[in-house]
Amino acid sequence: MSMSNSISVSAQMPSWLKIGGGLLAVLLIWEIGVIAADVPEYILPPPSEVAIRWWQTLPAQIYHLSMTGLTTLAGLALATVIGVLLALLVVYVRSLRAVVVSVLAAFNGIPKVAIAPLFVVWFGLGLEAKILLAFLLALFPIFVNSLTGLDEIESDVLDLSRLAGGTPMRMFRKIRLMNAIPYITDALKVAFPLALVGSIVGEFIGGNIGIGYLILSAQFNLDTSLVFASLVSITAFTSLGVGVIAAYENAFLKWRPSRRR
């Protein structure tokens, strides 16, 4: 087969097949390299051992990840509600825009790891601290995208709606909100992994449940295979969450021309 034909065949391969092939190659190199170099498992286990450990601890993985998922989704939902409401506030009360944006931007720059211990002191080892950390990490991207979607509307569209007798509430529902929904879903795809990170950070700092707690326990026992297995579960959960949001976009946002593939 000539080089041009090889390039043509490669270009026609589905993207998932290319990604899968690349991932398989990395795993094979990892497996062979670790075994050939006789690397101790507590330093770097081979992928085969990680897969076995993942299967052995699957019930525990599901249990702890479900608790992490609960705090993640609760924090994400809270961030969505508060973020959209704050965006509405600065859209309709322009005098507050500079203050609200500046305060949120400044607060977003504070490392959440630095304030996580305070939340544990204030709220204890329960779910509240994890939910708040998930909320704080997810809030800013949702606010910014919501503000963009609600505000970036051509003035001619609003003027035409007023001339047609549109009420403020109707203009909000039919114009501003419909324009903002795709922006909000884009924000959710970014905010979901951030909220997950917030929950796990809370579990690292203080907790006796959740995937972060499971990782800490495995690290304490030098069970590196379980650490990697937990990372696999986190990656799968993140992909699932973002995939659900993307599926919603494809199913319900086809009306937006820029969304059509």
Image (cartoon, rainbow, N blue to C red):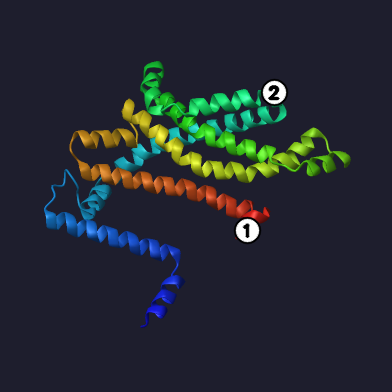
- Image quarter of residue 21: bottom left
90 or 134: nearer the eye? Answer: 90
For label 2, count other residues whose C-alpha is less than 10 Å away and answer few (under 14), some (14-19) or many (20+).
few
> Residue 42, how many percent across, how many down?
16, 43
Most extreme residue toward the left, as rendered?
38
Q: Residue at x 67, y 56 (%)?
A: 257
Reading the image, the residue beneath label 2 is: 95
The residue positioned 40% from the left and 16% from the top of the image is 122
Q: In this view, does 57 lie above or below 37?
A: above
Q: Where is residue 179 in the image (x, y as percent from the top left)?
A: 68, 44
Occupied quadrant, residue 115: top left
Out of 155 and 23, give the one closest to the viewer: 155
The x and y percentages for residue 159 are 83, 40
Q: What count of labels does the image hold?
A: 2
Determine whether label 2 and label 1 are within 8 Å by CB. no
Secondary structure of the residue carrying numbered label 1: loop
Q: In which quarter of the image is residue 200?
A: top left
Would residue 239 be found to the left or right of residue 185 on screen? left
Q: Is residue 7 above or below residue 156?
A: below
Residue with the mark numbered 1: 260
Q: Quadrant of the N terminus?
A: bottom left
Q: How far apart are marks 2 and 1 (CA)?
A: 37 Å
